[in-house]
Amino acid sequence: MLSGPSAGRTFVLAKSTLEGTSGSEAIDRELAQGASLLLEGDGGGGMLEVGGDTAFVDVLRPPPRLFIFGAGDRRAPARLARGAVRVRR
């Protein structure tokens, strides 16, 4: 939390479970709902106004993974993988 009565407290929302508390079940519930909406979206984090407090929510996602399967020309998967690395950078 950045400001308000719960300023300085840290919360973690993982697998629909909120770790940490503001001291108010209503604020905790509202914070979890707001953070869940940010997690469902494609964007990053954001600021949430929760019961008079301002919270910064940082969304951390694992990096994308690429699996290439194939048969036949053994060089084709290597060319695909090199192209994927260039696109990602």
Image: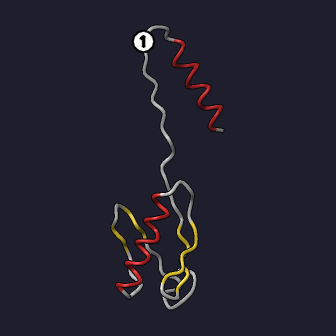
Q: Residue furthest bottom?
A: 5
Q: How is the image coloured?
A: secondary structure
Counting from the top left corner in percent of width and height, residue 20 is at 38, 77
Dot 1, how many residues are within 10 Å of its Cα: few (below 14), some (14-19), or many (20+)?
A: few
Q: Looking at the image, how many numbered discs can be counted on the residues?
A: 1
Q: Residue at x 47, y 76 (%)?
A: 10
Residue occupying the point 62% across, 26% down: 83
Q: Specify the quadrant that holds the C terminus.
A: top right
The one nearer the camera, 53 or 40, is: 40
Secondary structure state at the residue bearing disc 1? loop
Residue at horizontal 58 percent and vertical 19 percent from the top? 79
Q: Is residue 71 left or right of residue 57?
A: left
* Position above or below: 29 against 83: below
Residue placed under numbered mark 1 in the picture: 71
Q: In the image as oriented, which residue stretches furthest toward the top?
A: 72
- Residue 15 x/y as whole percent: 34, 61
Residue at 43% x, 21% y: name it: 69
Q: Identify which residue, 34 or 22, lies in the foreground.
A: 34
Amino acid at pointer 1: Ala
In x, y percent, where is residue 62?
Answer: 48, 49
Residue 54 location (% of width, % of height) = 55, 81
